[in-house]
Image: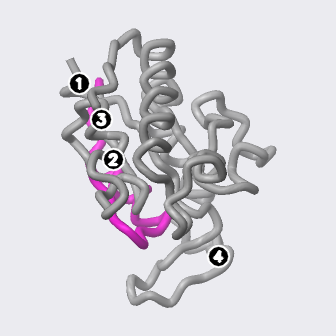
Amino acid sequence: MTSNIVVVGTSWIERTPEVQKPWPELLGLRNVWGHSGVTIDAQCEYILDNYKPGMNIIWNLTHWNQSDPRGDGTYIFPYDWGPRDKWGKLWVKSVIETVGESNLLIYPIYRPSLFDHHWLDYECIKDFHLGDVRKQHGDGRGHCNQEGHVVIATQIASDVLAEWFEQLDVKL
């Protein structure tokens, strides 16, 4: 049963001419949110606004130092986590602390990533970086081809089984 699994993603969950079945679709996951260009603050707000107890989230974490707090395409590098931040901490830490580490599997895309940040020493942040897969299975435009999505789906299925005891099959 995959009804309690939500995928929060980026352009890495979208179809392209080279990818007819992105990794969530290969795994039969239908509750998917995200889009190309989504920022970390938007992903976090989505999770915090929509989380319900019992929900498990696979989070295809966007570029960790990118944020668009005004929502107008004016990116701030890095985001200012100043006194106006209602959480007083990083967005990601607030999501992990609110949702619970056992309900999250977080996959960074590129290196360096949050995996290496000493503030976020959580086992739910995986050292499987989606961007690494494109080195062997690239589409020529910075993303993975279909084979790369099969590799990603296989790894995520293995992690879901290990963490949540739920079997996801890769359906080509």
Q: Which residue lies under the disc numbered 4?
A: 80
Mark 2 or 1: the one toward you: 2
SS under mark 2: loop
The one nearer the camera, 30 or 95, is 30
Pick the quarter of the image with the N terminus. top left
Does the stretch in magenta take in 35?
yes
Q: Identify the image quadrant of residue 63.
A: bottom right
Whole-percent x and y of residue 91? 54, 57
Numbered circle sitting on residue 2: 1
- How far apart, in angstroms, are the residues tagged by discs 3 and 2? 6 Å
Q: Which residue lies under the disc numbered 3?
A: 26
Q: Viewed as shown, does residue 39 lie left or right of 122? A: left
Q: Magenta stretch?
A: 33-54
Q: Amino acid at mark 1?
A: Thr
Question: Going 30% across and 35% down the picture, which residue do you hit?
Answer: 26
Question: Going 27% across and 27% down the picture, which residue do you hit?
Answer: 171
User: Does residue 120 appear in this view?
Assistant: yes
Whole-percent x and y of residue 90? 61, 57
Q: Viewed as shown, does residue 169 lie left or right of 43? A: left
Question: Going 47% across and 78% down the picture, which residue do you hit?
Answer: 69
